Structure formats: C-alpha cells, structure tokens
C-alpha cells in the first residue's frame, strides 16, 4: 500500500553505512544517492529513503519492517546489524501473537529507530 517511506537521520553517513549493511541480506541496496538523501530498493524503484535531519523537534521513534524472503534472511539481517554495532531488541523468532508463521528480528538503527526484518512464510520442511 505504501509507495515509499523516508526517515530523517542525525548522522546520514552512519545511517547509510548501517542500511547498506543490513538491507543487503534482504536483497535491497542503495540505488540513489542525492547527497542529502539516499534511496534503497531496486534500480526500478527506491522505496525506502534516509535523509539528513533538517526539520521537526526532538526524536520520535519509528518502526520500520522490511520483508525478508525467508527465515535465513531474517537471521542474516540480525547478524549484519549486530556486526554493524546495532543493539538487538528482539532476536529472530516466531511471533505467534501476530500469526503462526510471523518470523521477525528487531534491532535499533543509529538514530534509535526500531528496525525489523520479517518473513511471513512457514519454515520449510
């Protein structure tokens, strides 16, 4: 339903390094760099944007959930985030309160946002 999402970052270069690292296991990469903003997704369409913090007062935590193609990608996302220095909010696991096959991991990005990778498919047998 969303066309794209953008967030402001206190340190754009630190956030770019973080998202370059953690989105790679999910099959996304930086496809546009405008200097003050960067777009991630596929070459056809960047749908996640980060930009320099330039408006508003204070910090308001955002929750961003990225689709993972499988549970291994969720684990790889979490491992990449830890390697990039992120704090793990919730290690990869099934979240049955959402639905029986909801498998997600949650980490903090450099600005304190809650960033998730989620797979909705069951574990292959």
Image (tube, rainbow, N blue to C red):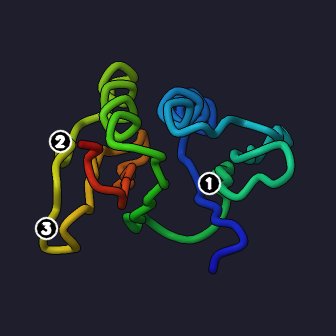
Judge the density around disc 1: few (<14), some (14-19), many (≥20) Cα neighbours within 10 Å. Answer: some
Q: Answer left or right for 41 relative to 60.
A: right
Element assignment for label 3: loop
Report helix, strand or loop for mark 2: strand
Foreground pick, 114 / 120: 120
- Report the side of 80 relative to 14 (left or right): left
Q: Residue at x 59, y 30 (%)?
A: 20
The percent coordinates of residue 28 (x first, y second) are 63, 40
Instruction: Give residue 13's position: percent from left, percent from top.
Output: 62, 30
Mark earlier in primary sequence (2, 3): 2
Q: Compute the Cα span from label 2 to label 1.
A: 29 Å
Q: Is residue 25 left or right of residue 93?
A: right
Q: CA distance from mark 1 to mark 3?
A: 36 Å
Crowding around mark 3 (Cα neighbors within 10 Å: few <14, some 14 to 19, many 20+) is few
- The x and y percentages for residue 67 are 48, 54
Give the percent coordinates (x, y) of residue 102.
26, 62
- Label 3: which residue? 96
Residue at 70 percent across and 47 percent down: it is 41
- Disc 1 target residue: 53
């Amino acid at each position: 339903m969303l066309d794209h999402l953008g967030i402001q970052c206190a340190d754009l270069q630190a956030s770019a390094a973080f998202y370059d690292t953690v989105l790679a296991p999910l099959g996304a990469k930086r496809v546009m760099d405008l200097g003050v903003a960067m777009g991630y997704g596929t070459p056809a369409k960047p749908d996640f944007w980060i930009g320099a913090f330039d408006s508003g007062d204070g910090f308001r935590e955002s929750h961003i959930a990225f689709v993972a193609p499988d549970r291994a990608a969720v684990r790889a996302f979490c491992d990449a985030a830890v390697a990039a220095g992120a704090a793990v909010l919730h290690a990869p696991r099934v979240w049955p309160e959402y639905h029986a096959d909801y498998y997600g991991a949650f980490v903090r990005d450099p600005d304190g946002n809650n960033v998730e990778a989620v797979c909705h498919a069951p574990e292959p047998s």
